[in-house]
């Protein structure tokens, strides 16, 4: 009975109608919105830290920054969750439909995209809850108790930013974007941007995994910018008719 049910679901999936132009426009608009919110996340983070680039490489500095209010940090992470991650889900579904017959590796590439989005969103949600609370507790604590909250803040940074994001997530993201660069429709420049984005993710993950701070920072900075550019560009590509995309 179980096998029969799975077979029926598979057959139904095989006969599903392809995405229409309207579907492409919706997916494209949501992907463009993800790029806008990702930019908003980056801008919010920069305002919260007074454009101090050192705070991004050493987030513990945020604890003593008056401009980094708990509310600002919370929105920084929430915008990150939707911008860099969750609003890319329609793009993953749409691009899978467009590339499913181009390679036997498409399912693995799509799975990597899902993993990147879900794992990244979980990390952002965790920090949206943890960091504002730790910042508030640190600033209200006595000087003797502040080191405890500082250590908890550092621990959350190591677990989420260094571990979940910059190692696990980056390899999944790199696999997805490198795969898309080879499979998805679009012009040469767009494919090149997708390839560079995927390579930057692998660079960041590799640098973080082997303790090569400079390599990881270069990859991360390229990713943070190109992910925004790619989302807006990909949204425009997806909104075009299929015949135009293949040109």
Image: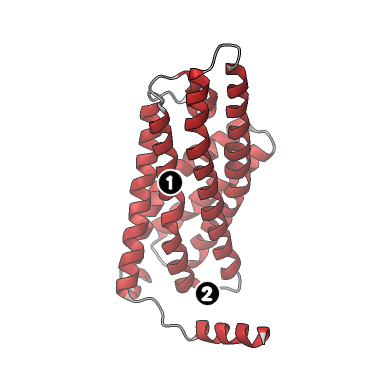
- In this rendered view, identify the residue nearer to me: 162 or 105: 162
For the image shown, how many numbered marks are present on the structure? 2
Residue 46 rendering spot, x and y as whole percentages? 39, 30
Which quadrant: the C terminus?
A: bottom left
Residue at left 63%, top 44%? 167
- The residue pinned by badge 1 equals 226
Q: Could you tell me if residue 73 is visible in this image?
A: yes
- The residue pinned by badge 2 equals 102
In the displayed structure, does residue 39 sit left or right of residue 107? left
How far is disc 1 from disc 2 in space, using C-alphas?
25 Å
Q: Residues within 10 Å of mark 1 (few under 14, many from 20)?
A: some
- In this rendered view, identify the residue nearer to me: 246 or 85: 85
Color scheme of the displayed model: secondary structure
Residue at left 64%, top 88%? 4
Residue 229 rendering spot, x and y as whole percentages? 38, 48
Label whose residue precedes the other's in the sequence (1 or 2): 2
């Amino acid at each position: 009975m179980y096998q029969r049910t799975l077979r029926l679901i598979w057959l139904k999936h095989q006969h599903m109608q392809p995405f229409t132009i309207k579907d492409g426009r919706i997916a494209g608009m949501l992907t463009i919105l993800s790029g806008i919110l990702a930019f908003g996340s980056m801008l919010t983070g920069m305002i919260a830290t007074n454009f101090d680039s050192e705070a991004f490489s050493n987030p513990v500095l945020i604890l003593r920054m008056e401009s980094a209010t708990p509310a600002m940090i919370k929105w920084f992470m929430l915008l990150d969750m939707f911008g860099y991650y969750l609003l890319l889900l329609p793009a993953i579904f749409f691009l899978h439909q467009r590339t499913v017959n181009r390679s036997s590796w498409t399912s693995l590439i799509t799975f990597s995209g899902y993993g990147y989005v879900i794992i990244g969103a979980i990390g952002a949600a965790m920090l949206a809850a943890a960091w504002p609370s730790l910042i508030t507790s640190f600033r209200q604590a006595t000087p003797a108790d502040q080191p405890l909250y500082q250590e908890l803040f550092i621990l959350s940074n190591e677990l989420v930013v260094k571990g979940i994001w910059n190692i696990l997530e980056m390899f999944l993201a790199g696999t997805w974007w490198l795969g898309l660069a080879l499979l998805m429709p679009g012009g040469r420049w767009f494919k090149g941007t997708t390839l560079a984005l995927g390579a930057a993710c692998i660079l960041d993950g590799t640098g973080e995994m082997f303790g090569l701070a400079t390599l990881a920072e270069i990859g991360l900075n390229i990713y943070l910018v190109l992910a925004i550019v790619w989302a807006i560009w990909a949204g425009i590509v997806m909104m075009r008719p299929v015949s135009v995309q293949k040109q």
